[in-house]
Image: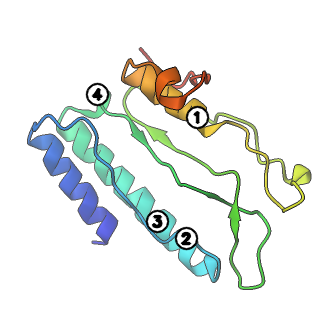
């Protein structure tokens, strides 16, 4: 198993222990692909997919899938245009995944606006990442997102009651 798979196994053990842990952060590193992206990206996405499938299976087995919200995030996006090293450089927009028993499936936001890149070759984002955080803070945790985010952001309608 890869390191991410081991982290998923540990997270499932923590959930199974009923230790009262409210949040668990897992990391899958290596997506900073400034070079040779074509070889690295498929491997990393496979590890992510396998890890998330294993996590879901463990949470279903433990009876905790309905009470779990999984979000992916990255601190930066990638530019759509390949650089001279067979990779992509830091950009402005990215994809995030939401999983859990209460998550409404589907795609949210708009398709990438490849015809509307800015002067640096960056994509405009379709959903502000703070809207995603507001979703978790308000609709999942029941908190006041405006305080945490220092402003009002619109939660996404992705969770069932």
At label 4, counting other C-alpha atoms closer than 10 Å, the crowd grade (few under 14, some 14-19, many 20 or more) is: few
Residue 98 drawn above or below residue 40: above
Q: Is residue 103 visible?
A: no
Say whether disc 4 or disc 2 marks the residue closer to the N-terminus.
2
Q: CA distance from mark 3 to mark 1?
A: 27 Å
Q: Is residue 62 left or right of residue 81?
A: left
Disc with the residue nearer the chain's start (2 vs 1): 2
Q: Is residue 157 left or right of residue 14?
A: right
Residue picked out by circle 3: 46
**Dots 3 and 2: beta carbons under 8 Å?**
yes
Q: Residue at x 63, y 83 (%)?
A: 36
Residue 29 x/y as whole percent? 44, 67
Q: CA distance from mark 3 to mark 2?
A: 6 Å
Provide the secondary structure element on which disc 4 rests. Answer: helix
Q: Are marks 3 and 4 in contact (CB under 8 Å)?
A: no
* Vertical position of residue 108 compared to residue 31: above or below: above
Side (left or right) of 21 relative to 102: left
- The residue labelled by disc 1 is 130
Of pointers 4 and 1, the one earlier in the residue sequence: 4
Name which of mark 3 and mark 1 comes first in the sequence. Answer: 3
- Quarter of the picture containing the C terminus is top left
The image quarter containing residue 22 is top left
Query: Which mark sits nearer the N-terminus, 3 or 4?
Result: 3
Where residue 120 sits: x, y (%)? 84, 62
Question: Vertical placement of 47 versus 64: above or below?
Answer: below
Q: Is residue 94 above or below residue 36?
A: above
What residue is rendered at 25% in x and 37% in y? 60
Estimate the spatial distance between the alpha carbons at disc 4 and disc 1, rounded to whole Å.
23 Å
* Residue topped by disc 4: 67
The one nearer the camera, 145 or 150, is: 150
- Which residue is identified by label 2? 42
């Amino acid at each position: 198993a890869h390191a991410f798979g081991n982290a998923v196994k540990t997270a499932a053990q923590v959930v199974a222990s009923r230790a009262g842990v409210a949040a668990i952060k897992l990391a899958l590193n290596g997506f900073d692909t400034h070079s040779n992206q074509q070889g690295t990206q498929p491997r990393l996405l496979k590890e992510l997919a396998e890890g998330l499938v294993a996590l879901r299976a463990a949470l279903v087995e433990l009876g905790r899938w309905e009470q779990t919200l999984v979000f992916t995030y990255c601190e930066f996006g990638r530019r759509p245009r390949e650089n001279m090293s067979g990779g992509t450089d830091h950009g402005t927009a990215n994809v995030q995944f939401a999983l859990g028993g209460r998550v409404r499936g589907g795609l949210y936001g708009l398709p990438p606006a490849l015809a509307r890149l800015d002067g640096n070759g960056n994509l405009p984002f379709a959903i502000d990442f703070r809207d995603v955080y507001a979703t978790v803070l308000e609709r999942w945790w029941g908190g006041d997102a405006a305080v945490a985010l220092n402003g009002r952001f619109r939660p996404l309608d992705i969770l069932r009651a």
